[in-house]
Image (tube, helix red, strand yellow):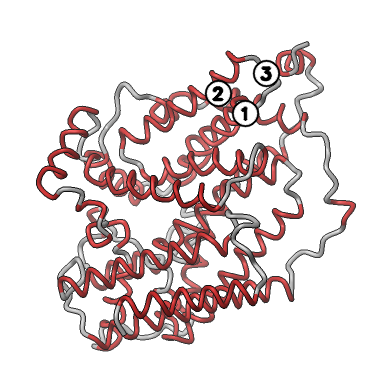
Amino acid sequence: MTDLSFTLCYLVLLTICLYLSKERPTSDVLSPGVIFPLVLLAYSVASSLFVHEFGSTNFGYPVGPDIIRTFYGCGLIGLGAFFCGRYLSVRFPIWHFNNSEIAETDESPTRDKIIVYALLSGLLCAPFIATAFNVLSQQSYAERALQSRIEDMEDSASGLKQVFLMSTPVTLIVCASSLLMFDRGRGILIRCAGAIVIALNLGANLLAGWRGNLMMTLSLVGIYYHYRVRRFRLSHLMVGSALIYVLVNAMALMRISSDPLEMMDALNGDIGRNSFGFLSLTRSGELLTGTNLMRQIGGVRDGELKYSFGETVLDDILVFIPRPLYPERPLPSSEKFVEIFYPGVRETGGGYGFFILQEGHWVAGYFGVFVMMCAFGYLVYSVYWVFLSYQNSLGAVFAYALVYPILCVFSVRSGVVDSLKAAMIALIPVMLLWVLPPVRNYSRASSVLHPT
């Protein structure tokens, strides 16, 4: 099977799955069945094209036709299993909805809470989040990335600090800024202030080279706009995806520095040497994570790795326990993979991503891929159905905006269990808003938020 025949088979299977599920991409372009299969296809094709061009993975492991055939089989089985999970989520729903629970309610209390707690968290955590909005002084990705991973491994409480002192306040501030920017009932200065805050966060992430954080902010603002202001069409999604693809690949070249002039020099220099080759699928390091599955397939064939029959999944679940509570918790599958096939890299803070089909293949080959992807499809679509039933709720919109990029985009290079864990962590700001007391009882806050 060639790359072209695999792509055609994949697209035919995707069309059949969408037809049988009666899901139309034009009805909601941000449903999981639209973007996730296309992202999975992009990663799969990029990896196979690279191997066919160079004869090996991007780390020099030779790949033969037998590995390529198994890789293609995993891709097609994974796609079909994902939509089987969708069918099961409809047939056996996690949540049985009551129409009385879905009625639209007054959004003012939720808006008040988001804005007030964003201000409070921003003030209290200012020393920790200042860099997230600082466009005047940033460390480049090349200077900071590996060192930060090493520090995180050495500090058992680093994850908690990151979540509660950095990620949560920044998320609340971006949510509040989105509310202000798109609220036509507010003055132009207030709306501009919201836009400026979002622009500062995007600029800081761009200079620092944090592509994931940049994507999260764009996704949060875009999904809020899609469900609360005006729906995107399929053409909008295609153009937006193309622009993001260009940006992500350009950032891979530019993030050697945080100086805008040096960043542009790096990009222009590469264009001068290779034209626009950085936009090629085989030049996109971001999309070559699929070669890790090829390395794993070869490892199983050569006896370097044995099927775990569920042990690796259990270890991944134990990783959900915070390290301060379970210091000796096992390594996640992604880090085990690096230790086995790239010894010494993990200790230096390196990592190469973990293709979403690797977990299932490690469990039990094709059968494991089917089970893991079916379970993933079931959970992702269950989240989507719950959101659709509560989409009149402002909190539900922001909750979906936070988990959507993790489950439907980032998951392809981070794996099933790690993505579910990241999605749960991303929901912490929304859960905090749910348990924190309302602010409408405070007359001064209400007068500021609702000027007459």
Vertical placement of residue 229 versus 349, above or below: above
Which secondary structure lies at badge 1?
A: loop
Q: Mark 3 or 2, which is nearer the eye? A: 3
Vertical placement of residue 37 versus 226, above or below: below
Say which residue appears at 48% left-offset and 87% top-offset. Answer: 367
* Residue 182 - label: 1
Quadrant of the frame with the C terminus: top right
Residue type, numbered disc 2 = Gly
For mark 2, what is the residue? Answer: 194
Q: Earlier in the sequence, mark 3 or mark 2?
A: 3
**Of the pair 239 and 404, the residue shown nearer to us:** 239
The alpha-carbon separation of the residues under discs 3 and 1 comes to 9 Å
Q: Are dots 3 and 1 in contact, CB under 8 Å? A: no
* Residue 186 - label: 3
Q: Are dots 1 and 2 in contact, CB under 8 Å? A: yes
Looking at this rendering, what residue extends furthest in the left direction? 273
